[in-house]
Amino acid sequence: MKRARMVLALGAVLAMMATACGKGGGGGTTIYDSVGKGEGALKLIAWNGYTESGEADKTVDWVTPFEDESGCKVSVTYADTSPEMVTLMRQGGGKVYDGVSASGNATNLLIAHGDVAGIDVDKIIPDYETIVMDSLKAPGHNKVDGGHYGVPYMWGPNFLMYNTDVVTEKPDSWDVVFETELNGQPNPYAGKVTAYNDAIYIADAALYLKAHRPELGIDDPYELNDDQLNAAVDLLKQQKTLVSKYWAAYTEEIDGFGSGDMVVGTAWPVNYTYAKADTPVAFTFPSEGMTGWADTWMMSSNAPHPNCMLKWMQWTMKPDIQLQVAEWYGATPSIKTACDQLRKDIGTDADDAYHCGDDAFLGGLYLWKVPLPDCGNGKQDCADLNTWTDKWTEITAG
């Protein structure tokens, strides 16, 4: 996988905000507050499954209707990791792509670097305040110093998926993927554990340690001092002896469960959605809690087709569009107005698996965010993303 070493102007993440109003690009200094005539094209960076145009399934297509209505011809470059998305967004001085479906471990990097433009969401999406889930109206991963940098799309947990033929007792802890011994016996799943292949996965280990090693004093799994980070790294090095393969593209995990090379590990809802078609799998929410992600459509501050990008943002905030994405991708809509139809279409899974409109559940997730030196307690001794990236390389290469 492509992997970028992202140099962050630390401290700028929380200080940077667009100051000029009006239409147009400009190094992250402009807030878009109106939509003009489309330029005829739109170039996006997206997660696989976020921009379906009927190619995978003729019945699944929310891109072609957008093209017909807006006159903006869509082209998409897919990425498998957040670092890859950041790298793509910066190509050609940010003038190659119009926008990106960025997760929280990329959004603040893009904001701080001036890669993305401000959006007056109330003017671009007039019903924004009434349709968006409360937790996603102004989250820290896309709103800085009072300014919005995009509109919410899908969200979901990083839950535990397992093969029910092999893992016959439903796990209630992440210990099945981290510990070399379970109940005094060698971990029976050794060699068939999987984990997400990204430095942000260090937070999953930190969350496990938060519950099992309270003496470490971990509060936020993304705010780790040296002792806390080293403990998480040690746990992940231990886990590596259990891992068959790390996954980045969700198809890697689907294939791994299908072949039997993987039987338990962290997963996204989309992985489960497709794996269950051919493999006996189930998912669970472990007692230690879960990390998660919430994705934002963000526009390049130098977008070549800004009006088409704004039109796309408006399109993606429609309930029928987010409903289609949810049912295809297996993620949860960010807007409450899609939930009633989701319940009609998929029944109890809308609440049991998707937790559609459930702010309490969403609020309980530790959503991906950029690790910074600021520990959130007045101290500046936490590890930054560059350090996390170096540590992850050390873990996976060792």
Image (cartoon, grey):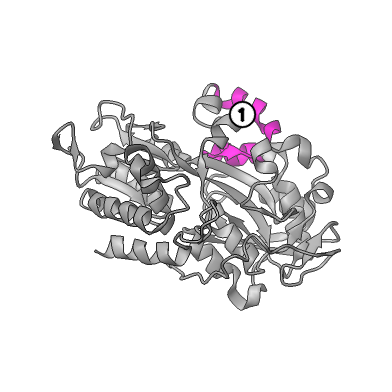
**CA neighbours of label 1 inside 10 A, class few (<14), some (14 to 19), many (20+):** many
- Identify the residue at image location x=41%, y=57%: 225
Residue at the disc numbered 1:
342
Q: Is 288 in front, or is 115?
A: 288
Q: Position of residue 377 (x, y in %)?
A: 53, 51
Secondary structure under tag 1 reads helix
Residue 248 sits in quarter: bottom left
The majority secondary structure of the magenta stretch comes to helix
Residue at 70% from the left image edge and 54% from the top image edge: 150
Question: Which of 251 and 209 lies nearest the eye of the viewer?
Answer: 209
Q: In the image, is 374 to the left or to the right of 69?
A: left
Asked if the magenta segment contains residue 336, the reply would be: yes
Residue 17 lies, in percent from the top left, at: 73, 62
Q: Is residue 61 left or right of residue 30?
A: left
Closer to the camera in the image, 213 or 335 = 213
Q: Quadrant of the C terminus?
A: bottom left
Q: Residue 274: say if magenta.
A: no
Where's the N terminus, which quadrant? bottom left
Q: Which residues are magenta?
A: 322-347
